[in-house]
Image (cartoon, rainbow, N blue to C red):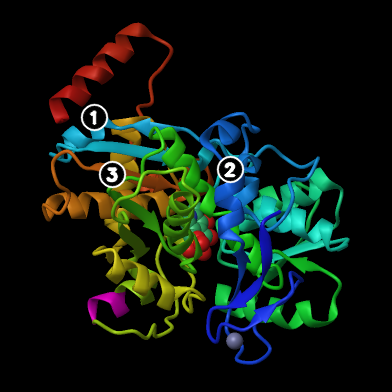
Amino acid sequence: MYATHLVCKGCGSQHPLEARFACDSCFGPLEAAYDHDAIAAGVSRELIESGPSTLWRWESFLPVCAPGRGLPVGNSPLIRADRLAAELGLDCELYVKTETSNPTHSFKDRVVAVAAAKSVELGYEALACASTGNLAGATAAAGAALGLPTYIFVPSDLEPEKIIAAAAYGATVFVVDGTYDDVNRLCSELAYDRPWAFVNVNMRAYYAEGSKTIALETAEQLGWRVPDRVIAPIASGSLYTKILQGFEEGRSAGLLDDGPDPVMHGCQGAGCAPVATAFAGGSDQVVPVKPTGIAKSLAIGSPADGVYALEVARRTGGSIEAVDDDQIVEGISLLAAATGVFTETAGGVTAGVLRKLAERGEIGAGETVVVYITGDGLKTIDAVRPAVRTIAVSPDPDDVDAALERRLASA
Ligand SMILES: Cc1ncc(COP(=O)(O)O)c(C=O)c1O
Ligand SMILES: [Zn+2]
C-alpha cells in the first residue's frame, strides 16, 4: 500500500490512517495522502493490465490493500455513443461510462468497496451509512457479502425501490423524518459513540478514494488517454472532484500521457443546486439549500465538497450547471432511446446538462467527451412514468395493427 497518512484539506496537518471524521485542529475534511514517487516506480501499464477485472486493479492508488473477499465492483463499460452525439448535433467522440453494471447498479459500490475493506482492516464489526439512496443499497450489499451487520439511515422521502432493496439485503434500515442533511448530522452524532464504520462519515477519507477508480478505468478504456471533457453529477461533490484527481494521479504515476486537465462540468438538479448557484454567482461560498425535485440521489443541501467542486470547475475551465425536473426526464428518455442505457434521475441530470452544453455550442469538434451515468433507471421508475406510453390491446393481430395505425395517425 502506498498511502502514508491522512492530510487535512483545510490546514494541511497530518494524521494517521485511522477512522476519523475531520481534522482535530481545524475540523477540515481529511483525505488520503500517498508516496507518489513510489507509485510511479511501482506501477506500469503492463502491471495494471495483468491485474484483477475489478476496481482492485487500481489498488496502488487506494488507501487499503485489496481484500480477498467482497463483491466484484468496477470494470464498468465505456460505451461509444455516436447516435446520441448525432442527435445532439455533436461532432465529437462521445462516450457514456455506465455504472449500472455494478452489483447494486450504481457507482456507490466503488466507494463502499474501499470503505468496507478499510473498515475490516481497522477491526470494525459493523458497517453503517447516511444515504441519499444508492449508498444504502451499496452498503447493505457489502455488509451482506462480508457478513457484517449493517445500519442504514435514509431520509423518509426516498424512492421505495432504494429503501426496499437495502432492507432486502438484511440491513437494519432507519427511515428518518428529515432531509439528507438531517440524516447526515444524526449519523455524525451516532458515529461518536458507536463502534460502527459509517462509510461516508468516519470512513469518508477512504470512501472518497473509490471514486478515483472510475477515472483511471476510463483512461485505460480510452487507450491510456485522458478525455478532453468530462460531465459528471454532483451531490456532495466527492465523485466530481475525485474524477479529476484520478486522472491527475494516473498521469503523475506515468500511466497516462501528459496534457491539459479535462474540462470538468458538474451537474445538479435545479431543486438542489447549491454548487451550481455559487458557480453562477461567482462565489467561493456554497450556501446550503433545502432540497426539492426528483433528483433525490443528488439531494444534498449542504455538500461537504462543494467548495472543492467550485475550485475544480474554475481551474479546468469547466462549469457547474443545473437542469430542472422536466429537463431531467427528457435527459433520461434521450439517453435511453439514443444509447440503450436507462438511467436514474442522477443520470437524467447529467444527460440534461450534456444537452444544454451541446445547445450552447460548448463541445468542440473532435473532442473526446465522457459522460458519467452513475445509477440505474429501474430505481426511479416513477420519475419517467408520466413520460412514457404503452398500448393496451387484446391478444389479436388485427387489434395490434389497428392500434399501430391509430398511433401513427396521432404521431
Ligand atoms: C447515482 C448517483 N450519482 C452521483 C452521486 C453524487 O455523489 P457525490 O456525493 O460523490 O457527489 C450520487 C450520490 O449519492 C448518486 O447516488
Ligand atoms: Zn485541519
**Span of residues in magenta:** 277-281
Residue to which mark 1 is pinned: 83
Residue occupying image coordinates x 53% and y 84% = 10
Residue at the farthest top position: 397
Dot 2 falls on a residue whose secondary structure is: loop
Q: Residue at x 15, y 39 (%)?
A: 90
Would you name the residue on which mark 3 appears? 369
**Which of labels 2 and 3 is toward the front?**
2
Q: Magenta stretch mostly in which secondary structure?
A: helix
Distance from mark 1 CB to nearest ligand 1 atom below 8 Å? no
User: Distance of mark 3 from mark 1, alpha carbons?
Assistant: 14 Å
**Tag 3: residue type?**
Val
Q: Nearer the viewer, mark 3 or mark 1?
A: 3
Amino acid, disc 2: Val
Measured Cα–Cα span from mark 1 to mark 2:
37 Å
Q: Secondary structure at mark 3?
A: strand
- Dot 1, crowdedness within 10 Å: few (<14), some or many (≥20)? some
Q: Read off the residue under disc 2.
A: 43
Contact (Cβ within 8 Å) of mark 1 with mark 2: no
Q: Earlier in the sequence, mark 2 or mark 3?
A: 2
> Which image quadrant for residue 3?
bottom right
Q: Position of residue 84 (x, y in %)?
A: 25, 35
